[in-house]
Amino acid sequence: MRPNIRPLSSVVVGLLLTALAVIVPAGDAVAAGAVRGGDTLYGDAGTVCRVGFNARGGTASYGIVPGHCASASSTWYADPNRTVQVGVTAGFRFPLDDFGVVRYTNPTLSYPGEVNAGGLGVVDITGAANPVVGQSLCHVGKLTGIHCGLVVSVNATVSYPEGTVTGLFRSNICSDPGDAGGPAFSGTTALGVIVGGSSGSCATYYQPIVEILAAYGLTIY
């Protein structure tokens, strides 16, 4: 039976130290002059979306986001008042898949290959891999930072009101409304982007990062 999942557009620290990487202090995206994985973007249509990871294709930098989020806006801002434009939607796939990319267009901001882990600082992400059942991972939620746990299944299929999404993986980590787009990683390795969770249980679903990178010819840096 396919679970019905709710899109997650946050979390308490259940910190699994083996899944964390080198940490440096984090800060507000606009104040810091940088947009990182885990930061929030604000769409011109009122959409609020989290960046999973930053990636590069040629000379351009991109933010990876859920497809159900990227499909709703074309222009993105780094602040809730929508005064600091950061980029434009460059593509998305949803349903069947659930991923999209925002091409960064603001040269006054930087786009480091790091994840903003809230009060724990910034985690440097250096590569990407497919998840393996039993692997430890952490993901970053919107309100309360990091939860950690294990990968419990791969090649999962779930149903949105808009249609079926296949090829996801699932963890035993709890997630809350507002988490969609949050990065999932193990050590310094990117694994995926939060796309949804099952109501009433600690089960979070992710779009694998390797598939997204291959679809757009991008690399983690």
Image (cartoon, helix red, strand yellow):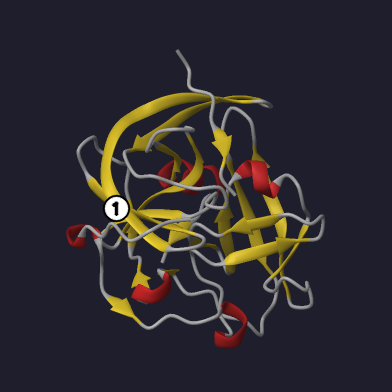
Q: Residue at x 67, y 25 (%)?
A: 161
- Residue 77, given in percent of the width and then of the height, sits at 72, 69
Q: Is residue 12 above or below residue 22?
A: above
In the image, is 109 to the left or to the right of 172? right
In the image, is 94 to the left or to the right of 220? right
- Residue, disc 1: 148
Q: How many residues crowd mark 1 within 10 Å: few (<14), some (14–19), many (20+)?
A: many
Quadrant in which the N terminus appears: top left
Q: Which residue is drawn at 68% across and 57% down?
A: 48
What secondary structure is found at the residue carrying circle 1?
strand
- Residue 39, given in percent of the width and then of the height, sits at 54, 67
Q: Residue at x 58, y 27 (%)?
A: 96
Rendering quarter of residue 61: bottom right
Q: Is residue 92 above or below residue 18?
A: above
Rendering quarter of residue 111: bottom right
- Residue 57, given in percent of the width and then of the height, sits at 54, 60
